[in-house]
Image (tube, grey):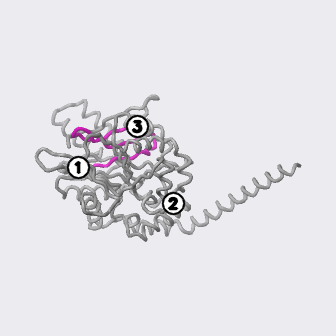
Amino acid sequence: MPLFLLQQLMHLSCMKWTKEIYESFRRLCKRLLARPVTWLANKVSSAPNQRIVFEALSTVYQNAIDPKSNKAEFLLLTDNSMPVIILSDQHKGNRNGADDFAPTESTYLEALHYYNEKGYYYINLGDSEELWKNNIFSILRHNKATFEAERLFVDREAYCKVYGNHDLFWKHDPLAQQYLKQMYGKSVPVYGGIVLRLPAKHEPHTDILCTHGHQGDGQSDGNWLSAMIVTYIWGPLQAFLQVNTNTPAHMTERKTLHNQMMYAWSADQTNLKLITGHTHQPVFESLTHLERLYLRLEEARNKDDTTVIAAIEQEIPKRKLQYDYVNQNYRSLKPTYFNTGCCCFSDGTISGIEIENGQIRLVLWKRIDGTYKRIVAEVASI
């Protein structure tokens, strides 16, 4: 047997044994550590303290609007000449079986092409890269097309990148700007939040605070040391063990609590609206889609519109399978809180928030019969 072929067979054999040993070790660690790791995650962040959440959101807002603030990671945008698109939670991975972004990549690229052609300003609201499950090198290698599409906004100076809990890497890694230069061809600041300041007829202005929404989460929004632990130890540990530690994206209870706290803070402000991501669940004017269906059902019954009543009654059970909680005060909530949803729905759909000409819109992008469709799901005047 030729020496070269023998060397290759030995190399493949070693790789196979190495992989089997690694998998055996990982399974053993998972058996021993999955339960305590999950317990610790829930202990730290399953029930965030409302006072801490409120203080964290207020800090983000004040640092963005205070001209004397030396916090470079917050941005105040007063140029209202461009329409704005806000998308979040792509969770770009390495295209393996655990990559949540893989089904939506083509939809996302189509949407970015549309928004760039229309001259939109793009706010990327966090968890854009899945750096809990993947290293930065694999993400750079497998997401070149999406980075090129985002780079078009960077080149127009129409791009704002906000960090979330799954990409705290961008805030803390000392080489973050070097990787961003590989992605976008230039240094790109990464912000904790951005405020859009819009003129108003009867008030000095209306502010729209856009931030990822993990503020106050003990696992992801603690001090510098805890953030470093999440970035370099906690996230990789969860990826290695392949455990779901009940993040808001997966747990109904956490989504409910998140929505309640985000709404409560925003409703207590003056001339301010709040837009977050984080839960992967769209919210428009403080209402989930299920709650809006109940409002529309009441309106249809008042009008005795049997066709609309029948359609809504058919849709409600489907929505309940996704999210069953209904705020009993849904009829009287202030329209102050919005959530983008996400760009990693398993059916290839993405959702986002558009702001243009005094209007705010919840939009869905879907692939229907081989064609990409932009669907305006909700619209209201700011």
Task: Give the secondary structure at mark 1.
Answer: strand
Q: What residue type is labelled 3?
A: Ala
Mark 3 and mark 1: Cα distance apart in space? 25 Å
Helix, strand or loop at label 3? It is helix
Between marks 3 and 2 in the image, the one whose residue lies nearer the viewer: 3
Compare marks 3 and 2 and give the one earlier in the sequence. 3
Residue, x 46% and y 61% (percent of image)? 245
Residue carrying label 1: 197
3 and 2 marks in contact (CB < 8 Å): no
Question: What type is the residue that disc 1 sits on?
Answer: Arg
The x, y position of residue 376, in whole percent, is: 31, 35
**Crowd around label 3: few <14 · some 14–19 · many ≥20 (10 Å):** many
- Residue 326 seen by the camera: no
Position of 311 relative to 217 (above/below): above
Quarter of the image where one finds residue 349 = top left
Location of residue 306 in the rendering, given as x and y in whole percent from the top left corner: 22, 31
Residue 343 covered by magenta stretch: yes
Side of 22 relative to 167 (left or right): right
Name the residue that disc number 2 marks: 243
Residue 196 locus on image (x, y percent): 26, 49
Residue bearing the label numbered 3: 111
